[in-house]
Amino acid sequence: METTSLSTSWNQLSRFGSQTAWEMLEKEESSRRITTSCADLDKVVGGGFRCNQVTEVGGVAGIGKTQLGIQLAVNVQIPADCGGLEGKAVYIDTEGSFMLERVLQIAQACVEDLHSSHRKMTPADFLDNIFYFRVCSYAEQTAVINYLETFVADHKDVKVVIIDSIAFHFRYHFDDMPLRTRLLGEIALKLMKLAQKFSLAVVLTNQVINKFADGSFHLTLALGDSWSHACTERIILFWKGSERYAYIDKSPSVRSASVSYCVTERGIRNSSSNCKLVKMM
Amino acid sequence: MYPQNPLPLPLTLTTLPKISLGCPILDHLLHGGVPMNTLTELVAESGVGKTQLCLQLLFITQYPPLSGAAVYLHSELPFPFRRLHQLALQHPSLQNPLVNVFIEPLYDAHQLFDKMSKLEFMLSRGGVVSSHLPVKVVVIDSIAALFRSEYGNNREDLMTRSKMFFEISSRLKAMAVKYGVAVVVTNQVVDVMDSDGVGNSECLVSSGRRVSPALGLSWTHCVNVRLFLYRQYERVVGEGESVEFETRRFIRVVFAPHLPDSSCEFVIKREGVIGIDQHRMIQEKCEIVHNAGTLLRALKP
């Protein structure tokens, strides 16, 4: 037993700490996922929001970005015997949309859905496991993100970090756009490192802007082109008629697809319409 | 730096701070009223009742448990003093309610920045004069009027404008959180020409016009709660020339982190803005019919 561990560490050393692709695949396959409570959405993102990576969720106001954020902060706490991660959540609120009564409502629904026989979680327990930071400027936001590594090192059971939204405080105050790009680049690296080091999921929400290109206006996510490289996975939420849709815009592992979902009293759920077809593109 | 405990104890929904609208039906729609610590927007075309609702808030705030004063920044002149006075008379249990309402005019967007600095100072002191109640609601009526004339439709102006939106919103929200204040801003509407608008679920309709909230997409990201007040004309009697229309007013939750998309009818009376519960009205009518039935049966030998 000891010899094997010695030889592995010797192996590691001789490879300058690098990993083989095989090891990475194993790690990726074993990496845990946080369910969104919407089976269709889970299916298209490959089983849920993945740990070890940064996922960006963008969309217009009122489409359900915050709802998804709250849902993930609750769902990450689902006990292990119910197939959850039994982790805690860090919620960085930059816009002030984290409404306690809504969190309670979603947590209540989650409790009702769980059939855990061992211990009964109450909605209040769920709130206890969400570390909430309210930030009111880009400086505060940067400071909290810098501090996250220390914080998560002390709270190893944090399995998801949600920033709602990454964009808000970076959309004013900057006349010097290259500076903004640099600051955001730094944030992106820090979050990526955080996700890898503590194998947790980082979920960022982003806003949309009207961009003029090719002679017409179209909607695109805020923070510019360089930011679009910052996240591993990008999900765009949009309206189609009166139905909400999620579209996988960028992902290294799953196919580009769109699926409808619904925001109900109980949280994010499958769309109630009859045509629950997942469209692969 | 340490995370806040999001859970205020004891845990009851009533402890979640809201400002009542002074009407149980409207409060029911908003799950208790206008939330504190956030930015709520009232969107409507002129004359539907957004100012009425704001004026009402100025007085309701003064009742316990909130017992707060109100700041009212208005950019749509003139200020409706007579209506304010009329509403003040509806609250005889408050001692001189007009003393706790601070009114200031706004002429342009830059002035709003100055006013916000003053406001921050005022809030940090706990009130204007120590004997006054602490400020609990800040109303800006309307934000759209500040931006309508000064900025053009070219790219630079739009970008400057959008930056200003985010800065205003961020400062108002910071104030709201720090001092436990509800911030309410009103917004106007613009007509929508093309069908898809900006990707929202559907067009908003008021008085038969297809409208969208003014100030565009970036401002939409600046508010936490968007309420839309709209009007419908319904033909009551007559045909041809002698048609009479009845105006019906509705309030709808367009988006809010804690509320479903829902709506309710309201009327504006001398006493203020009052919600109408359609369901209950029907129910009451049924009950009357039912009661009349039992009465008749009882009378019959």
Image (tube, rainbow, N blue to C red):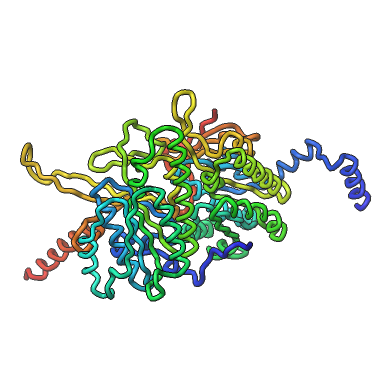
Residue A260 position, x and y percent, is 47, 39
Q: Is residue A72 left or right of residue B179?
A: right
Relative to B178, does residue B130 appear above or below in the rendering?
Answer: below
Q: Position of residue A65 (x, y in %)?
A: 50, 46
The percent coordinates of residue A70 (x first, y second) are: 53, 53
**Residue reaching furthest top?**
A214
Residue A127 image-quadrant placement: bottom right
Look at the image and tell me whether residue A205 can be seen: no
The location of residue B280, given as percent across then percent down, is 24, 59
Quadrant for residue B194, please give it: top left
In the depicted view, which residue is nearer to us: A52 or B51?
B51
**Depth check: B157 or B68 in front?**
B157
Say which quarter of the image contains residue A178: top right
Q: Is residue A176 above or below residue B5?
A: above
- Up the image or down, A52 lies above or below B124; here it is above
Asked if residue A148 lies left or right of residue B174, the reply is right
> Which residue occupies 33% across, 71% down?
B63
Residue at x 26% of width, y 43% of height: B206
- The residue drawn where x is 58% and y is 33% is A225
Q: Quadrant of the C terminus of chain A?
A: top right
